[in-house]
């Protein structure tokens, strides 16, 4: 296809979403990416405004705001919708984005459980003694002696917490806390609607609470674990509560896993498979969701042991490498088959809900090919749009000659893992800080972004 004809490509055709008259101006989907730009107490900052205005100027049809917390608890510089006090800042951000783009914007709302950093051996020993979990005599052991005997001194759960840091699991939750979760999601969705967003994306993927309930690794023995029906119970309660709170015209979709790909200690791959995901997708459509965005892996279960003083990061193990294909030799479109399989299942069940594919999609030809072959309805590109937010405009209007192509290096992921502001190594360097990058200017690959022009007045 010639560059001049790209405006007629499927990628740049509008697509209705939901039942409220919302229409995506094109089929380029920016998935949620944590930016670590919020304030320490979860508010929108000028840095948050800068990056999302930058994405809006780039022309993506849908921008999914980064994972936004629903519990009113300390969670560092992650955005929150856990209280009405967060609404004004998010509303101002949405107004600014609407002024420069016809694209839709929705926050991804998320519940996550407690996690702690891995403690030094002596601190862990002292804490266990203080809580009465180990006898005081254990403090007479050297750190090395305790580490050598950890297998006999600690139970399986305690051993995991010693080696990887404490991590709460869904099996730790009592019924009272579980029954709060749908209401927290519903209240966050109501605040998103009040802030002027077009909808919400429920985060049912990766290492987080709802994904763990959906998983075949869910070991609960009550009504929220075991059978498929039980594992679906909480996610469906969340969908019902959100829909009751915001009505039918507000877009409500979710991101969930087409495959978990957890590598067990014996080397076997366990967790939900595509067959499980197909069945989940049909039930979510039956519950009234407006879109399904498909991801893969990214689980705590097989994450690598973190250094002392750091918390486990769910994208370091085998499942993490499936979620973020980071080897330049990995084939393009590596996870699209999951979206395709789920799309086929929901179509066979009679639903026309659009399905978003993602996973190393970074050229116009790839994106257009996925749509034209009906393997998915929307094309999600995270790293590609981080590298060059202007890809939609460039692909439509001028071709590829001035596009900034992702090189699939680990830079952005490393920044995320260490809770630093996520940028791209292809962006211009900040002269005052060699590690930092400046947001690139519209249509000028080497130019810094004019922050003052955005926030003047």
Image (cartoon, grey):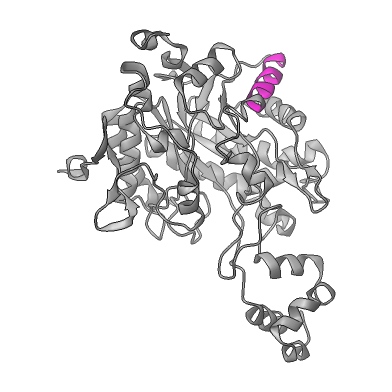
Q: How many circles with numbers are drawn on the protein?
A: 0
Task: Look at the picture and state if 257 lies above or below 164.
Answer: above
Against 334, is 188 above or below? Answer: below
SS assignment for the magenta stretch, majority: helix
Q: Is residue 249 left or right of residue 194?
A: right
Quadrant of the rendered image containing residue 130? bottom right
**Pick the front one: 214 or 365:** 365
| Residue extending farthest left | 457
Q: Residue furthest front?
A: 329
Instruction: Name which residue lies at 77% across and 29% down.
Output: 275
Q: Quadrant of the C terminus?
A: top left
- Image: 64 above or below 178: above
Residue beneath the point at 55% across and 46% down: 110
Give the side of residue 433 with respect to residue 283, left or right: left
Is 386 above or below relative to 41? above
Task: Please tell me which residue lies in front, 111 or 26.
Answer: 26
Where does the magenta region start and end? Answer: 338-349
Asked whether, in this view, residue 142 is left or right of residue 437, the answer is: right
Nearest the eye: 407 or 448: 407
Relative to 420, 454 lies left or right: left
> Would residue 398 be seen by someone viewing this image from the given angle?
yes
Residue 381 x/y as whole percent = 48, 31
Position of residue 288 measured from the top left corner of the image (x, y, whole percent): 61, 26
Residue 217 lies in the magenta-colored region: no
- Quadrant the N terminus occupies: top left
Percent from the top left, x then y, of residue 12? 41, 15
Q: Quadrant of residue 436?
A: bottom left
Between 246 and 433, the one nearer to me in the picture: 433
Q: Please indicate, yes or no, whether residue 204 appears anywhere in the rendered image.
A: no
Residue 348 appears at what percent x and percent y? 72, 14
């Amino acid at each position: 296809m010639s560059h001049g004809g790209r405006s007629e490509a499927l990628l740049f055709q509008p697509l209705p979403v939901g039942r409220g008259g919302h229409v995506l101006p094109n089929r380029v989907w920016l998935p949620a990416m944590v930016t670590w730009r919020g304030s320490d107490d979860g508010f929108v900052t000028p840095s948050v405004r800068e990056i999302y205005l930058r994405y809006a100027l780039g022309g993506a049809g849908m921008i999914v705001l980064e994972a936004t917390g629903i519990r009113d608890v300390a969670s560092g510089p992650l955005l929150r919708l856990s209280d009405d006090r967060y609404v004004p800042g998010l509303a101002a951000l949405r107004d600014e984005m609407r002024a420069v783009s016809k694209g839709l914007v929705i926050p991804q709302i998320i519940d996550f459980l407690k996690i702690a950093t891995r403690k030094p051996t002596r601190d862990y020993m002292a804490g266990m003694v203080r809580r009465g979990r180990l006898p005081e005599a254990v403090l007479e052991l050297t750190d090395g002696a305790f580490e050598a005997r950890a297998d006999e001194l600690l139970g399986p759960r305690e051993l995991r917490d010693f080696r990887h840091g404490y991590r709460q699991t869904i099996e730790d939750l009592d019924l009272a806390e579980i029954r709060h979760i749908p209401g927290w999601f519903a209240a966050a969705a109501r605040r998103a609607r009040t802030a002027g967003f077009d909808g919400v994306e429920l985060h049912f993927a990766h290492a987080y609470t709802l994904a763990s309930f959906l998983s075949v690794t869910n070991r609960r023995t009550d009504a929220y674990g075991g059978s498929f029906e039980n594992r679906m119970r909480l996610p469906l309660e969340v969908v019902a509560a959100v829909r009751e709170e915001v009505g039918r015209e507000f877009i409500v979709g979710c991101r969930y896993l087409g495959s978990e790909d957890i590598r067990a200690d014996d080397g076997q791959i366990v967790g939900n498979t595509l067959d499980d995901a197909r069945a989940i997708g049909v039930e979510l459509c039956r519950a009234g969701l407006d879109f399904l965005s498909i991801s893969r892996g990214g689980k705590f279960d097989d994450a690598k042991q973190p250094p002392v003083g750091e918390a486990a990061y769910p994208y370091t193990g085998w499942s993490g490498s499936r979620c973020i294909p980071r080897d330049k030799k990995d084939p393009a479109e590596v996870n699209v088959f999951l979206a395709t399989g789920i799309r086929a299942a929901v179509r066979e069940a009679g639903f026309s809900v659009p399905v978003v594919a993602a996973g190393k999609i970074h050229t116009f030809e790839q994106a257009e090919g996925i749509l034209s072959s009906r393997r998915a309805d929307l094309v999600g590109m995270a790293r590609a749009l981080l590298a060059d937010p202007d890809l939609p405009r460039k692909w439509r209007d001028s071709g590829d000659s001035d596009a900034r192509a992702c090189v699939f290096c680990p830079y952005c992921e490393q920044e995320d893992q260490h809770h630093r502001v996520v940028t791209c190594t292809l962006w211009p360097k900040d002269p005052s800080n060699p590690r930092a990058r400046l947001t690139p200017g519209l249509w000028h690959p080497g130019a810094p972004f004019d922050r003052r022009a955005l926030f003047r007045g």
